[in-house]
Image (cartoon, rainbow, N blue to C red):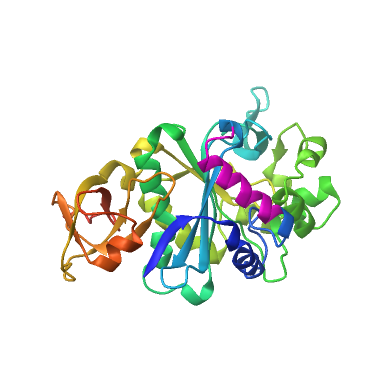
């Protein structure tokens, strides 16, 4: 049985193996032992309530209940930009007009922005390719919403998610070649690694403070603004089905879109409800639902057959053990997918 649980120190070698499989472009999961070890420690300290909000971040892993081996990772930053600046580009317009010449030009621009400072961020979503079957990807991505619903006061009103932008198998990013390389004088992979390991001061030091005219970028760079890497398209679709939208903010490195949503408007948070756990024989004919316990430090989430209209959920002994719950405990339940609207 696949479960979601908080990251543990023993997960470090498994996270390193996952990082090696990303192919680059996932800034928050670098192939760097020290960085990943520090990320694990920060997550553990967040759960221990010993860090200020500006430094808090939760890391979860998808693991097999039988051997506890981590095969996927996802995370939530509580409030970005309060300690280290959180940059992106805002895609906007500038108007140049001459009444005398009857010329009116509406030109698209990129402006360096900190507009999402103080937002909670969904990040570091990656699933081992060998486990990308069934519903594992949905469980990994959406389990965070049940945690946020259970502990709503620990998160901010707005939630954002940076999507990986377009790059090829060699790590070549057309957006970077047309924008970032002009100011940073380094390869995309090097800048990506520096950012992923927390070395971000170079962004403020080297990025232009004035708007950039998109018209001056290469056609290849213009074409990928707000677009996602093909392997990230499913993750974008999952978030958009939950209510996230692209609001004209893109990553400064690869031009990938930043999606955002008010936390209380996220479908899985808004529609989730508490049900009482009971031991018995689950009805396998029921649809798989996201189910999570209400234990902050021993949080667990899994996919279990359930009736979202009921006030109780039937679990087998193995399911109850995996979810670390007892009969009578309150479990948060929500349908795995948004219900289709009937015409």
Comparing 32 with 222, the one in front is 32
* Residue range highlighted in magenta: 35-51
Kindly tell me whether residue 247 is visible in this rendering.
no
- Coordinates of residue 276 in the picture (x, y in percent): 19, 49
Q: Residue furthest left?
A: 310
Q: Is residue 149 magenta?
A: no
Which residue: 75% across, 31% down? 210
Q: Residue furthest right?
A: 185
Which residue: 36% across, 47% down? 146
Tell me the quadrant of the picture where the N terminus can be found.
Answer: bottom left
Which residue: 14% across, 48% down? 311
Kindly tell me whether residue 287 is visible in this rendering.
yes
- Coordinates of residue 243 in the picture (x, y in percent): 37, 45
Q: Picture quarter containing residue 50? A: top right
Position of residue 15 in the picture relative to residue 329 (left or right): right
Looking at the image, residue 317 lies above or below residue 187: below
Q: Residue furthest front?
A: 326
């Amino acid at each position: 049985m696949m479960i979601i649980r908080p990251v543990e120190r023993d997960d470090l070698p498994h996270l390193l193996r996952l990082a090696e499989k990303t192919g680059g472009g996932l800034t928050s999961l670098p192939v760097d032992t020290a960085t990943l070890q520090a990320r694990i420690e920060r997550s553990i300290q967040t759960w221990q309530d010993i860090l200020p909000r500006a430094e808090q971040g939760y890391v979860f892993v998808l693991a097999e209940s039988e051997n506890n081996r981590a095969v996927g990772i996802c995370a939530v930053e509580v409030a970005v930009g309060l300690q280290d600046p959180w940059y992106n580009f805002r895609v906007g317009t500038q108007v140049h007009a001459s009444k005398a010449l009857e010329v009116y030009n509406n030109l698209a621009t990129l402006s360096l922005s900190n507009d999402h400072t103080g937002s909670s961020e969904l990040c570091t979503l990656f699933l081992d390719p060998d486990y990308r079957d069934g519903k594992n990807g949905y469980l990994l991505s959406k389990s965070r919403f049940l945690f946020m619903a259970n502990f709503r006061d620990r998160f901010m009103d707005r939630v954002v998610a940076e999507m990986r932008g377009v790059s090829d198998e060699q790590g070549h990013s057309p957006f970077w070649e047309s924008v970032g390389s002009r100011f940073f004088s380094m390869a995309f992979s090097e800048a990506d690694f520096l950012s992923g390991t927390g070395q971000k001061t170079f962004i403020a030091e080297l990025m232009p403070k004035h708007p950039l005219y998109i018209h001056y970028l290469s056609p290849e760079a213009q074409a990928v603004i707000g677009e996602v890497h093909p392997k990230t398209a499913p993750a974008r679709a999952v978030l958009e089905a939950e209510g996230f939208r692209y609001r004209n903010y893109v990553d400064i490195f690869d031009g990938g879109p930043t999606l955002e949503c008010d936390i209380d408007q996220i479908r899985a948070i808004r529609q989730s409800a508490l049900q009482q756990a009971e031991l018995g024989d689950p009805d396998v004919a029921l649809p798989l639902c996201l189910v999570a316990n209400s234990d902050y430090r021993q949080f667990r989430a899994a996919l279990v057959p359930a009736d979202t209209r009921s006030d109780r959920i039937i679990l087998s002994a193995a399911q109850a053990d995996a979810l670390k719950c007892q009969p009578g405990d309150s479990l948060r339940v929500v349908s795995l997918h948004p219900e289709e609207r009937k015409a």
